[in-house]
Amino acid sequence: MMRQATGTVLLIQEGRFRLLTDDGRGLAFTLSPAAPIEPQDLPPLLHRRVRVDYEDAPGLLAGAAHRVERA
């Protein structure tokens, strides 16, 4: 099931990033292979407010981000 989070990107490393949500939670994400963006598209989003459409990834501590766009 697809979920959604909105917040500020705090950290980016390759295809992974950490989001501080608007309600104060810290969430970790990895880009899904199906995402329309590539890891090199993430750095301009650092310290920006974004919306992430994601699903929980079984066996991983991070969600699989299917869409990341400026909010």
Image (tube, grey):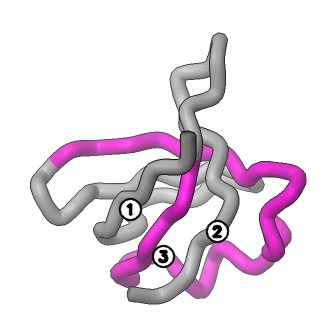
Q: Which residue is mark 1?
A: 10
Residue range in magenta is 25-54
Q: Which residue is mark 2?
A: 67
| Amino acid on which disc 2 is placed | Arg
Determine whether, in the image, residue 16 is placed left or right of residue 45.
Answer: right
First in sequence: mark 3 vs mark 1: 1
Q: Which residue is mark 3?
A: 46
* Residue 63: percent from left, percent from top: 56, 38
First in sequence: mark 3 vs mark 2: 3
Going 82% across and 74% down the picture, which residue do you hit?
36
Determine whether, in the image, residue 40 is placed left or right of residue 65.
Answer: right
Going 64% across and 28% down the picture, which residue do you hit?
57
Q: CA distance from mark 3 to mark 1?
A: 6 Å
Q: CA distance from mark 1 to mark 2?
A: 17 Å
Of tags 3 and 2, the one toward the viewer is: 2
Tell me the quadrant of the picture where the C terminus can be found: bottom left
Q: Secondary structure at mark 2?
A: strand
